[in-house]
Amino acid sequence: MTPPPPPPSSNRRARKGPPPPKHLASPERRLWDAILRENLLDNEAALSILRSTLEAHQRARTCRETVDREGAIYRDRFNQPKPHPLIAAERDARAAFVAGMRALNLDLVGEAK
């Protein structure tokens, strides 16, 4: 017998929110829709934080894709191995995404309570 699902948090509510910003890519647009469908974010400040949070997610994702394609190490003009500069940009963007999710008081998968 499976346990019953946990009760929804107080800020959860099934609803349709504003459309995602047009500059977000498809994965982030789907996240926008999912977050607004499951949570009550009904003021401009929260939507602005969500937009910035998903922009950070998109930046981290595109950095990761570029590093995966080009490799984590490159050689400088002196033929010395160096970490790809986008590794730092990805790290910073991921930190911004996590901070935005926390600012919105949204659960992060796998985060200990």
Image (cartoon, helix red, strand yellow):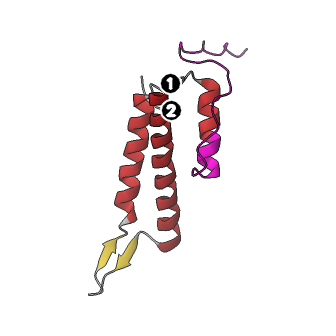
Image: magenta residue range: 1-30
| Residue 7 against residue 71 in the figure, above or below | above
Identify the residue shown where x is 63% and y is 18%. Answer: 13
Q: Nearer the viewer, residue 21 or 36?
A: 21
Q: Is residue 16 visible?
A: yes
Q: Is residue 107 visible?
A: no
Residue 81 pos. (x, y %)? 31, 78
Q: Is residue 104 left or right of residue 40?
A: left
- Disc 2 residue type (three-letter): Leu
**Residue where numbered disc 1 is placed:** 43
Identify the residue shown where x is 45% and y is 42%. Answer: 52
- Disc 1 residue type (three-letter): Asn
Identify the residue shown where x is 37% and y is 44%. Answer: 95
Circle 1 — which element?
loop
Query: Which quadrant is home to the N terminus?
Result: top right
Instruction: Say whether marks 1 and 2 touch (CB < 8 Å).
Output: yes
**Residue where numbered disc 2 is placed:** 47
Query: Which quadrant is home to the C terminus?
Result: top left
